[in-house]
Image (cartoon, rainbow, N blue to C red):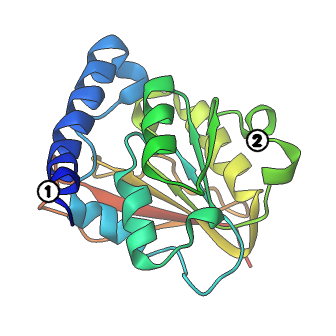
């Protein structure tokens, strides 16, 4: 890597953290986290995306793209990733960082209105970093249900949370949920909740 490239790569995390903090100060309810997901949590979330599957992966709330990067490092082709982001600054960062990723600016809590017809799914997996706990329970549940409706058979919604309880409780006959172990190396510690429709 050339010296200029090294310098640019070294500055990127600091630039991303600054953009994240500015967004948090300007609109804490939308940003919802104190910092981007750490590398351990990002890799764990990305591990739910199958590099061998040709179907697209939906990423609601990618923020500055730390989980996006982890998915690409895992072997997910950028052309398979559809990132839905509300914050225009984050959208610009994503477009700049990830050639090939489809970046859609809009409300991930209203996928029907946000996703164009050619990106409506079905998705193999949905990997979400949305700040669900900043929203009322009925909005969270609606998000899970509409997301799972866009998954292929066997698909799942992967959601991280800082809470000890699931951000959306399972609903019998509609969807089930299981959780990962705590990622203590993340700041703050977090765990992953995986939602699936019944077979």
Eyeballing the image, is 31 above or below 188? above
Give the SS element for disc 2: loop
Residue closest to the eye, 150 or 79:
79
- Residue drawn at x 60%, y 32% is 139
The location of residue 102, given as percent across then percent down, is 64, 50
Q: Report the disc number at residue 3.
A: 1
Residue 176 seen: no
Q: Closest to the observer: 98 or 154?
A: 98
Image coordinates for residue 177, horizontal then vertical, percent: 52, 65
Q: Residues within 10 Å of mark 1 (few under 14, many from 20)?
A: few
Residue 32 - label: none
Q: Residue at x 30, y 60 (%)?
A: 191
For residue 54, side relative to residue 194 (left or right): right
Residue 80: horizontal and vertical position, in percent? 64, 66
Find disc 2 in the rendering and name its residue.
115
- Front position in the image: 33 or 91: 91
Provide residue 167's location: percent of width, then percent of height: 44, 46
The alpha-carbon separation of the residues under discs 1 and 2 comes to 40 Å
74 to the left or right of 155: left
Residue at 11% over, 61% down: 185
Of tags 1 and 2, the one toward the viewer is 1
For residue 154, side relative to residue 2 (left or right): right
Numbered disc 1: secondary structure = helix
Q: Of all residues shown, which one is farthest toward the top?
A: 26
- For the residue carrying disc 2, how many other residues have a C-alpha within 10 Å: few (<14), some (14-19), or many (20+)? some
């Amino acid at each position: 890597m050339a010296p200029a490239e090294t310098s640019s790569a070294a500055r990127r995390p600091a630039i991303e953290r600054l953009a994240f903090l500015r967004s948090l100060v300007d609109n804490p309810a939308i940003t919802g986290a104190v910092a981007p997901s750490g590398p351990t949590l990002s890799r764990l979330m990305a591990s739910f995306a199958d590099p061998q599957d040709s179907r697209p992966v939906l990423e609601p709330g990618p923020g500055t793209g730390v989980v996006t990067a982890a998915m690409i490092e895992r072997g997910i082709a950028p052309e398979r990733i559809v990132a839905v982001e509300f914050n225009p600054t984050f959208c610009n960062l994503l477009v700049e960082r990830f050639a090939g990723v489809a970046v859609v600016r809009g409300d991930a809590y209203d996928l029907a209105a946000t996703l164009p017809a050619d990106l409506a799914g079905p998705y193999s997996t949905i990997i979400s970093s949305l700040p669900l706990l900043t929203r009322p329970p009925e909005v969270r549940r609606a998000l899970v249900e509409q997301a799972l409706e866009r998954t292929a058979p066997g698909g799942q919604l992967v959601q991280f949370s800082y809470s000890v309880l699931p951000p959306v409780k399972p609903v019998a006959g509609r969807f089930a949920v299981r959780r990962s172990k705590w990622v203590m190396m993340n700041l703050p510690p977090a765990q992953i909740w995986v939602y699936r429709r019944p077979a």
